Image (tube, rainbow, N blue to C red):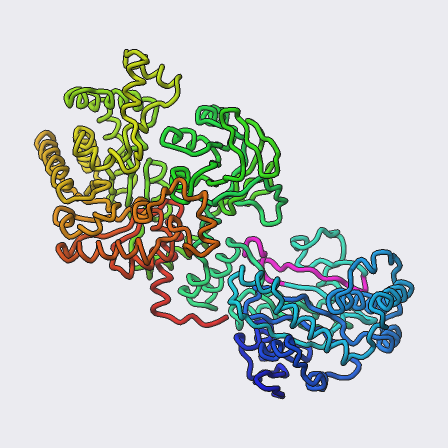
Amino acid sequence: MQQKTTGNSAITLVTSTASMATPTHGGRAKCLQRLVRLDLPVPTTVALSFNMVHHIATGALPDISDILDHFPNDVLLCVRPSSEDPDWGGPGAILNIGMNDTSHTALSDRIGSEAAASLYLRFVQAYAVHVARLDADVFDDIAEDGQAGLSAVLAAYEAEAEEPFPQSRDQQLTEVLRSMARAWEGTTARLLRVAKGAPVDAGLGLVVQEMALGLGQGECGSGVLQLINPETGLPQITGRYLSQSQGREALIGGAGSLFLERDPRGPSLEDLAPVAFAALKVDAALMRKRLREEMQIEFTIENGRLHILDGVRVARGPRAALRIAVSLAQDGIIAPQEAVMRIEPRTLSELLHRQVAPDADRDILGRGIAASPGAATGAIVFDPETAQAYAAREEPCILVRRETGPEDIRGMHAAAAVLTEKGGMTSHAAVIGRGLGLPCVVGAAHMRFQTKRALLVAETGQSLTEGDIITVDGSSGQILAGAPEMIEATQDDAFQKLMSWADEVRDIKIRANCDTPADAKTARNFMAEGIGLCRTEHMFFDADRLTPMREMIFANTPEDRRATLEKLLPMQRADFIELFRIMRGQPVCIRLFDPPLHEFLPNDRAGLRDLAEALDMPVSEVTRRVDAMGEYNPMLGLRGVRLGVTVPEIYDMQARAIFEAAIAAQRDGAEVTPEVMIPLVSAMREVELVRARIDMVAAAVRAEQGQDFDFRLGVMVETPRACLKAADIAQHCHFLSFGTNDLTQMTYGLSRDDAGRFMSDYVKKGVFPEDPFHVLDIDGVGELVSLGAERARRTHPNLILSICGEHGGHPDSIAFCRASGFDYVSCSPFRVPGARLAAAQLVIRETLVPRRH
């Protein structure tokens, strides 16, 4: 190793024994050293450390001879950036440093005057724009190539810079280093890389490398090669190669090459340079094995001789990343646990939903909150009835609403995606969308929703009406015009293998929030370990159930209510039987009726008239009764357990349906122990009253059916008071499940449906680090949860604890629950795989220190 230092900075010749590391010299420099250690044909390279580059940016230039002493006088050089993480970006590479009048003459004799002139011309233009900072349009009027073009470019440079183009390689290299160092430390570059996750003080290294031009009299050219398809991760030799001898691109890996359209009848690299091509394949396989990664090789061939200029991690999308990680583990190159660690849990949702293709054109109409991942294209519709009509014709549609409510459930089931003006991450549309696996964008407040006029006005001012085709991208929050190219969802063998490895180490259970049999089937497919939350109210909005439900609401006596609920009992029982059969003995936690009753009543004149007809009552009387049921703040009004206490017939019917369904499922061979959950509890006495009635129903069903059964009773902890009084409440429960959606809403005093209007401003200004409806507030809401869990376990040590809000699928929330000794988390079905992966990664982080790669 040869190393020269200036203060705390260093200039290092890249050898197998040089003292270098990614945190001090960057990933590119360290990778080149690894290639040297593999004895690959890497040109002479010198690395400048982060400290050195910082000194250069502040004006402390090194003695340039410390760098140039490592290179022959007549070779050209290139300078490339070397940041700690390639995703953080950096200044572009500058090639052919040292090109001047003398080297142009020498190269003309060697490779021909036209090729030499072209090389010189491109260097002058790159130097002018990126180093001398001249306007690129200085060269716009120069159309000539070759010698004439070179002369014109040199003249234009001299006129604009008011000095001749520098002829000294020392001066050229000095100015290139200064320019690249200052570009990295500029304000714009700093903001861009911080946005990509880089620390504010992230350093940049630079590598100076001898140019292997790939020019000469024999087969010469340059290109890149990799062993996999970067879109799928499947084995396939792909790349590109520009042959100087052929004057065009040649095939690499046959017609399957992904980079450019080319004539399949043309020559391949294997035909033009068989020895070099064979060496490339061997070198790529060696890099894959020793660097423990799929690598792309940047190379040149000069008179048939191979030079490897760089090796970079193959760029890949989520599906390719997963297959690559699994393939490396199956080949014994990395451990299965490391494969698990290499995949971001959030990216799994992209595999489970259709996505807009990365290179698709995006005509953006507006933006909102990305509430449910995936993308879908369809015709705009403004009401659930029209959505159902489109579905009947098997035509995709996008349901556009100011906000959704329970009455929109059928339309959401029929639509391909949902777009709303209001709402946040835990709004009705967001929660139901994630449960259905339905792409959803909410809070698109900068678009104008004129639903009564069937008009949607884009942020650009463009007017859209029913039937216009748009695309909702629930992964990015964008609303796009037309139908961009899509990538289909996938669950291949690699996905299943990775999940099996994750489940081998995971130590917290993952359940799913399921409201329908379709949800339950999805949960089973994603290997959920039961249902952690079944919201029964969504079962009452089907047309055959809504009328009896409204009759019950309008009943004047308990006897009338019970009589009406008898119509709903067989429907509820059938719902639960199907859930129990689908889950095949896994736990099913059913939340008793929660929403305020007025949500089931119409609010328009036509709906009121239909209800009056169904009930055989005057419209005026129906209107009066509906108005009388209105509440100033219904989310804090007569709902949840308060309905169970004041209108107990509803919970009686639901409990009977649950228990009769459990017996029916048991007779079919399923082992069922239903879990019955009481929502919105604030006081122990509420639990005592409801439990007493449920125990009575259970005793009656046992006597009537002549068969015993077990069940567990629990409480959904959604109010701050329930957390504070958890010790008292736990005495009457088998489990507590923290409903963090409502708990967050009540702790903050924020409406989860309206917070989207200002939440982005709060996050940008640092009021909240994240949207608390998206990421659990560990310091505030989390403290209440921890306090409640601690107090509950103090009086009931074997109490089952869980979280069943949408926070349950977030990795940070899973870490919090696991550290707090919770038994499981529950989230929407499509978030279950990501939750399984995140839970496994928590265990692996505690037991392994993954090797850097």
- Asked if residue 32 lies left or right of residue 370, the reply is right
In the depicted structure, whether residue 535 falls above or below residue 32: above
Can see residue 635? yes
Residue in the picture at 39% in, 40% down: 753
Q: Which quarter of the rendering shows the N terminus?
A: bottom right
Residue 211 image position (x, y, % from top left) = 73, 74
Q: Is residue 217 magenta?
A: no
- Asked if residue 701 lies left or right of residue 426, the reply is left
In the depicted structure, whether residue 561 falls above or below residue 341: above
Residue 777 image position (x, y, % from top left) = 35, 54
Q: Is residue 232 magenta?
A: yes
The magenta span reads: 226-246
In the depicted structure, whether residue 654 falls above or below residue 552: below
In the depicted structure, whether residue 649 falls above or below residue 177: above
Residue in the picture at 25% in, 20% down: 551
Residue in the picture at 57% in, 43% down: 486
